[in-house]
Structure formats: C-alpha cells, structure tokens
Amino acid sequence: MHKSGFVTIIGKPNVGKSTLLNRIVGEKVAITSHKPQTTRQTIRGIYDANDAQIVFIDTPGIHAPKHALGRIMTDAALNTLGAVDAVLWMVSGLEKIDAVDETIIERLKAVSTPVVLLVNKIDAAKDIGRLEELIHDYKRRFDFTAVFAVSAKVGTHTDLLMEDIKAMLDEGPKYYPEGQVTDHPESFLIAERIREKILRLTQEEVPHSVMVTIESMEHDDVNPALYNIHATIVVERDSQKGIIIGKGGRMIKRIGTEARRDILSLLGVKIYLDLHCKVVKNWRNKEPYLKHHGFHHER
C-alpha cells in the first residue's frame, strides 16, 4: 500500500526545522544558519520512497513579531496547522517552555490535526534528567499523538520518526514526479543560497535586514553552456550596504564566490553570478513592497 500526505514542521526560530527537512529529503532544499529567523517563507520538501510520498512544509520560526515581515512569517507558520495531515512541533531540548510555546499550544488546541512533539538537539543535552523533565512538562500541557527526542543534526531517531509518520497517513497517490525534492522554482532556491552566505558571513546587524531578489537568469549569448544570473541584495540602511560590499568590495566578492559554489551544485552548469547591493529603507514594514516580492498574509 502506498501512502501520501502533507506534514508541516513548526517551532520557534533556530530550533532546527530546516536541518530536519534537509535530512528527511536527503538534499538541501532549505538554507540553514545559526542566526534565528533564517526561514522566511514556507518551503516544501518532498520525501519519496517506494511505500510513501510525504510533502513536508518547513515554516518560518514562530516569534513575537516586531515588523510587518515578522507578522507575515508567523502567520505563514500558524496558518498551515489545519491544512495538513500531521503537525511536527519542534522544540529545543536545551530551552525551557516560554510564552511563545504557550501561544503555540493554544493554537494547536484549536485544530484536530495529529501533533507530534519533536524535542531536538539531544546530541547537545548534557543533563538527561533535565531533558526528561522538560518532555514531561510539554506532555502535561498537550495530548500529543507521539513524542520523539531527536537530533536533526546527526539523525538520531529520525528513521523511527519517519516510520511513525507513515503509519499516521492514509493510502494515497504520488503528488510529484519521482526525483523531485521541492516545488519551488530555481530562482527562489538561488536567491536563498545567496542569502544563506550573507547570514553566515556578515555581522549581527545585517542578516534580518537582508533580502535577495533575482533580476534575471539566462543562458549566455556567446557561450550557451554558461548561465548568467543577476541578483540584488536589498538592505535597510547605508551602513548595512557598506558591510555587504566590504572594504574594496571584498565581502560581496566572498559572498558571490561561496554562493556560486552552491548554485553550481544546484544547477549542474557553469554560472556567472553578478551581485549588486541597494538600500530600501524600512522595507520590512512596507506591505506593498513585501507583497510584490512574495511576502503576503495567507488567509
């Protein structure tokens, strides 16, 4: 019997949702970094096996938003709860329950979707007794379908998790062709890879204020084997633009070099990557601008 379904992964920023998605799918479909709120839009990763095809939805980290983009990101995560076959709520095994967790619990109580609690980062947990106490604390607050202590980073118990998820799902068809790992266009994946390098290479004041847009992607007129990609890095302040460009243009060159390596692996063809940086003041609070670039409230 072949099973299929949709599973959303929710949680606070930086708990490891994207790392788990990439491990399940077996390829890099979501960017990762140690910076919170790396994921800004829902990202679908497709797990495909002989007995099942499961579409996992990686969502932005749920947090107390401070600007329009933050509200859109949080809404995008919470709005998936009632539209899937199962919910994976990922929490950090290294952190206590806080007000944001309590808010998530209240939202989960409002839907009938099965919820699996994933307590992540057990590879870094030193006090097992404290970890068990934390899990008990979560179980007191909500009646989970299942609870797993996992490490998305090293893969601990993720195989058992997949077997449990399959058992929850009904018989169904393949929604996507074999071999497809995401339904996002190449332009989105390329922009995200550039943004990942910025998150990893720049100072703390920059990451949350950065957006990357792909202006054009086309084969070179002279050399058809070469793919020309022109991208713009958008920041909110002139000082951030200075950091992105770097002294003598060294930082933007380094961002391009590291991003090019990832994009080459993604596309499998030679590329020319042209990066520019511009300032759009307070872009995260300009709803028409956000909507134009694919960020909008989902109803």
Image: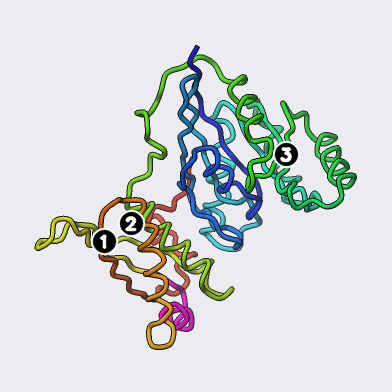
Residue 132, position in %: x, y? 86, 41
The kind of residue tagged 1 is: Ile
Does 140 appear above or below 194?
A: above
Q: Which residues are magenta?
A: 235-245
Packing grade of label 3 (10 A; few <14, some 14-19, many >=20) is few
Packing grade of label 1 (10 A; few <14, some 14-19, many >=20) is many
Mark before the other along the chain sequence, 2 or 3: 3
Residue at 66 percent across and 56 percent down: it is: 64
Mark closer to the observer (1, 3)? 1
The kind of residue tagged 2 is: Leu
Mark before the other along the chain sequence, 2 or 1: 2
| Residue carrying label 3 | 106
Horizontal arrangement in the rendering, residue 194 relative to residue 231 (left or right): right
Residue 294, position in %: x, y? 39, 52
Mark closer to the observer (2, 3)? 2
Measured in 3D between alpha carbons, the distance from the residue under mark 1 to the one under mark 3, in whole angstroms, is: 48 Å
| Residue carrying label 1 | 271
Question: Can you tell which mark lies on residue 264?
Answer: 2
* Residue that lies at the very extreme toward the top in this rendered image: 1
